[in-house]
Amino acid sequence: MTEIPDFSVLQQRLGQEIAVSDWFEIPQDRITQFAETTEDHQWIHIDAARAEVESPYRTTIAHGFLTLSMVSAMLRNAIRLPRQRMGINYGLNRVRFMGAVPSGSRIRGRFVPSEVKEIEGGYQVVWTITIEREGSEKPSCVAEWVLRYLMAA
């Protein structure tokens, strides 16, 4: 866990990797639950028998959005930020899904602050996140994630 005592520390580390999360397993039951939640039942995600025969991965794969949705848990696992009233997901500037995450794989996130600016009541941080899959040379996802941190009054 990387401790960030003040947002000025992030400002001084722009463009530098400051933390790497632990590995998170993506088992089939998580993929299936995500399919149910999002109503995305494409066979490459939920039909293991068909995937074994027709998919180049020979197994089901996680939804790209499932992989991306793990960034919140990864960030909480990797970085302790200064006390704040709340954090707000402000959106994404750019997302690329570059490699599949087969069922049963483990993924982790690498975090680089690319922009830190003071806003009314807090800070806005743009995180460049690389999600990597264990055993793969190619990232599964690279994203620019914009978060707003509103400080306690």
Image: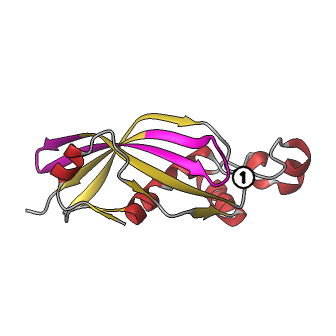
> What residue appears at the point 34 percent right and 43 percent down from the top-left corner?
16
Relative to 94, is 114 on the left or the right? left
Q: Residue at x 50, y 39 (%)?
A: 142
Q: Is residue 69 above or below residue 95?
A: below
Question: Where is mark 1, residue-wise?
Answer: 102
Across and down, in percent, residue 73 comes to: 45, 61
The residue shown at (11%, 45%) is 120
Q: Nearer the viewer, residue 148 or 74?
A: 74
**Residue 111 x/y as whole percent:** 40, 49
What is the quadrant of the C terminus in the image? bottom left
Q: Quadrant of residue 37?
A: bottom right
Q: Secondary structure at mark 1?
A: loop
- Name the residue at 42% across, 65% down: 77
Residue 94 appears in which quarter of the rendering? top left
112 sits left or right of 71 in the view? left
**Of helix, strand and loop, which mostly describes the magenta segment?**
strand
Q: How many marks?
A: 1
Q: Quadrant of residue 28?
A: bottom right
In the picture, which quadrant includes the N terminus?
Answer: bottom left
Is 56 inside the magenta-drawn segment? Answer: no
Check the image and report above or below for 80 versus 94. Answer: below
Relative horizontal placement of residue 141, taking residue 115 as reference (left or right): right
Position of residue 129 measured from the top left corner of the image (x, y, whole percent): 44, 45
Colour style of the rendered protein structure: secondary structure
Range covered by the magenta-colored residues: 116-143
x and y percentages locating residue 123 in the rendered image: 18, 48
In the image, 40 versus 57, the foreground residue is 57
Q: Amino acid at mark 1?
A: Pro
- Tell which of 117 and 9 is nearer to you: 9
Q: Is residue 123 magenta?
A: yes
